[in-house]
Amino acid sequence: MTSSTYFDDFSAYTATNMAQRGSLKWTAFPGTIGAWIAEMDFGISPAIAETIRAEVDKGAFGYLPTCARDDAKAATARWHQRRYGWDITPEQVCLFPDVLTVLEATILHFLEPGQPVVVPTPSYMPFLTQPKLFKREIIEVPGLRNEAGRYTLDLDGIDAALATSGGLLILCNPWNPVGRVLTREELHAVEAIVDKHGARVFADEIHGPVVLDSERRHIPYASLSPTAASHTITATSNSKGWNIPGLKCAQMIVSNDRDAAELDEWIQHYEHLASPLGVKCAVAAYDASDDWLAEVTGVLRANRDLFAARLAEALPDAVHAPAEGTYLAWVDLRPYGCEHPGTYLREQAKVAINDGEDCGAPGHARINLAMAPDNCVAVVDRMAGALTGE
């Protein structure tokens, strides 16, 4: 990495210090390295910190004022135009507490009774459980993986899953947990299948700001064409790129008039659930934190490369394709006979990770690399010690 304004020194992010900070990531499993839930150890941008301090000084913790709501919608629209070249209006943005509540609203308002939810796997864990709360069938479509561990969508599988009665395709891009940033060609192929079956897309783009390679670019699915816009609800948030999941402000982007009319009577209900402080910090993230995001992305890129190199040395039979986006590593540990890595690594290696079984892929580990570089190395070394006895 080049010289850094924010991340020259990682001494504050030791395992001991992170446990004392008290986040869920580091306290849920005492005595382990916290490498599971998707939050970063690196704090927040100066602009977000200043926003929080200003609100504390003002004692401004009442209900969400209209002006703050409108500011956040406008900032969301500006970010999407500046970052992705997607021209949306503030009126297309609705505020929500989190992406899962956007999914809940999408299921309730846009999925007909009896229609399934189609989930490419490996998947973000709640996508395999939350639809069941609403009595919806889940059809898992395992992704296709090459020998190097790189995943692509099984387009034929998605086609077959939607063929009978349409339904809702959950399209996570960048793809949690495997780290793919889907190409324009892949997205157009999805668009053709969904359009053919009169289906819908829930586009989870929460990791869109975290693209690790300069040759990759996040493309909002609904920005592809009027056809894609006509069948898509987009969910995004500042929680991953700017590390503020606890502030509870996500954004739904509604890309056609029919969906906007369907939601019109409900918007006040959903926006009332968003945190006023989170709404104000969303503006600071989108409008005044580009430099911090660029630097933290550089740290995440370096951690990805460090982890991959160390893994290749210490566990050469593990299957792992370095992520193109997100700060997650997805590792197949079945070559080492590890079918339940969540429990095994937590108990034997003192490393807390997400078990791939919860993502629809037993024998895999989802590992959060948004930590000090020394901790990334320690994760691999502890895993190797537990799996090989060396």
Image (cartoon, rainbow, N blue to C red):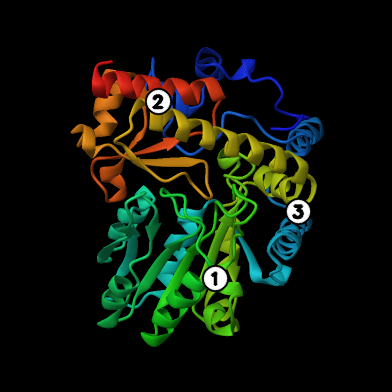
Residue that appears at 52% across and 70% down: 233
- Residue for badge 2: 380
Q: CA distance from mark 1 to mark 3?
A: 34 Å
Q: Position of residue 261 (x, y in %)?
A: 57, 80
For image coordinates 52% across by 31% down, the residue present is 306
| Residue at mark 2 to residue at mark 3: CA–CA distance | 44 Å
Q: Give whichever of discs 1 and 3 has the lower sequence position.
A: 3
* Left or right side of 371 for 5: right
Question: What is the quadrant of residue 314 in the picture?
Answer: top left
Q: Residues within 10 Å of mark 1 (few under 14, many from 20)?
A: some
Residue drawn at (25%, 44%) of the image: 357
Q: Is residue 77 left or right of residue 106?
A: right
Residue nearer the viewer, 273 or 293: 293
Dot in front, 2 or 3: 2
Counting other residues with Cα less than 10 Å from the Cα at mark 2, is it few (<14), some (14-19), or many (20 or more)? many
Q: Residue furthest top?
A: 16
Which residue is at 34% across, 75% downward?
Answer: 167
The residue type indicated by label 3 comes to: Ala
Few, some or many residues within 10 Å of mark 3 (<14, 14–19, 20+)? some
The residue pinned by badge 3 equals 68
Please provide percent x and percent y for residue 214. Answer: 65, 52
Secondary structure beneath dot 2 equals helix
Is there CB contact under 8 Å for labels 2 and 1?
Answer: no
Give the residue at mark 1: 184
User: Disc 1 or disc 3, which is closer to the eye?
Assistant: 1
- Please name the amino acid that badge 2 sits on: Val
Where's residue 125, x and y in %? 35, 48
Secondary element at image label 1: helix
Q: Earlier in the sequence, mark 2 or mark 3?
A: 3
